[in-house]
Image (cartoon, rainbow, N blue to C red):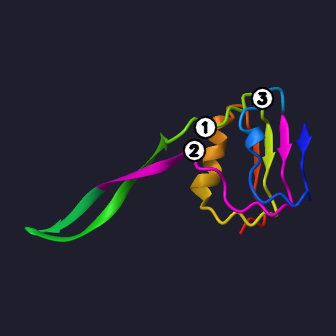
Amino acid sequence: QIYLDENSLTEFPKSLRHIRGVSVLSLRNNQIRGLPHWGHYKKSETLQSHMTGKEITGFIPCLWTLEFIVDVKPPSWPDMLSLDLSGNPLGVDVEHVISLALNAPALTTLRCIDCD
């Protein structure tokens, strides 16, 4: 278990990119702004048209899919059960936070309370 709470960290520690045997990582109440970009989501949309006679009256998204595209080698956290980023001014969207879970197959808890 690694607890780096309240250490005034301003970025996600690079040394934590590949850690094995660690089940809990807590980075609560630091000043971490942003998260490393290991990749991005590609959003694709299938549209369904509503037709009245021969006129198209509009399009309604009926299926959204997100595909994660890897830009650089992502972290490897095979044993991580819990990750807590609460209390950091991350300033990232929820998809970015969720992408961390893709690299931790055993993850059961991902906390980001009060992450602006």
Q: Nearer the viewer, residue 38 or 51?
A: 38
Residue linked to disc 1: 74
Gap between marks 1 and 2 measured at Cα: 5 Å
Estimate the x, y position of residue 107 in percent, counting from the top left: 73, 37
Nearer the N terminus, badge 1 or badge 2?
2
User: Is 74 situated left or right of 14 in this image?
Assistant: left
Q: Secondary structure at mark 1?
A: loop
Visible residue check, residue 68: yes
Query: Can you say whether 58 is above or below 73 in the image?
Result: below
Please tell me whether residue 94 belongs to the stretch shown in magenta: no
Visible residue check, residue 64: no
CB under 8 Å between callouts 2 and 3?
A: no
Q: Nearer the viewer, mark 2 or mark 3?
A: 2
Estimate the x, y position of residue 11 in percent, counting from the top left: 74, 56
User: Is 38 situated left or right of 65 in this image?
Assistant: right
Q: Which residue is found at the position 36% from the left and 56% from the top?
A: 62
Q: Residues within 10 Å of mark 3 (few under 14, many from 20)?
A: some
Residue linked to disc 3: 79
Please tell me whether residue 33 belongs to the stretch shown in magenta: yes
Nearer the N terminus, badge 1 or badge 3?
1
Q: Which residue is found at the position 65% from the left and 44% from the top?
A: 100
| Quarter of the N terminus within the rendering | top right
Residue linked to disc 2: 38
CB under 8 Å between callouts 1 and 2?
A: yes
Estimate the x, y position of residue 99 in percent, counting from the top left: 60, 46
Gap between marks 1 and 3 measured at Cα: 15 Å
Q: Nearer the viewer, residue 97 or 37?
A: 37
Q: Nearer the viewer, residue 33 or 84?
A: 33
